[in-house]
Amino acid sequence: MSKETRSIDKKGFSNKFFEELDKEHDNAKEFAKRQKELKQKKNRQS
């Protein structure tokens, strides 16, 4: 996703909105990665 230099893009969304969206997406990816690692760790122990 390209970052806009203007505070408001053509559709009226602010950069802050997209920054928050990117942050949430990163958080979701991190969470999924941790869940996968925990699952693998649990499977190795059994």
Image (cartoon, rainbow, N blue to C red):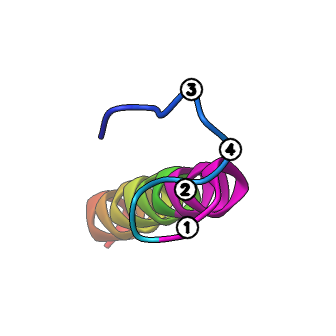
Q: Is residue 7 above or below residue 9?
A: above
Q: Residues within 10 Å of mark 2 (few under 14, many from 20)?
A: some
Proximity of marks 2 and 1: CB atoms separated by less than 8 Å: yes
Q: Earlier in the sequence, mark 3 or mark 1?
A: 3
- Label 3 and label 1: CA atoms lie apart by 12 Å
Q: Earlier in the sequence, mark 1 or mark 4?
A: 4
Q: Could you tell me which quadrant the C terminus lies in?
A: bottom left
Instruction: Answer with left or right where residue 45 lies relative to residue 1.
Output: right
Give the amino acid type for the residue marked by disc 3 in the picture: Thr
Give the amino acid type for the residue marked by disc 4 in the picture: Ser
Mark 2, secondary structure of its residue = helix
Q: Could you tell me which quadrant the N terminus lies in?
A: top left
Instruction: Answer with left or right where residue 30 lies relative to residue 19.
Output: left
- Label 2 and label 1: CA atoms lie apart by 8 Å
> Dot 4 corresponds to which residue?
7
Q: Residues within 10 Å of mark 3 (few under 14, many from 20)?
A: few
Query: Which one is closest to the eye, mark 2 or mark 1?
Result: 1
Q: Main secondary structure of the magenta part?
A: helix
Q: Quadrant of residue 3?
A: top left
Mark 3, secondary structure of its residue = loop
Residue drawn at x 72%, y 54% is 16
Proximity of marks 2 and 3: CB atoms separated by less than 8 Å: no
- Chain part drawn in magenta: 12-24
Residue 13 drawn in magenta: yes
> Dot 1 corresponds to which residue?
13
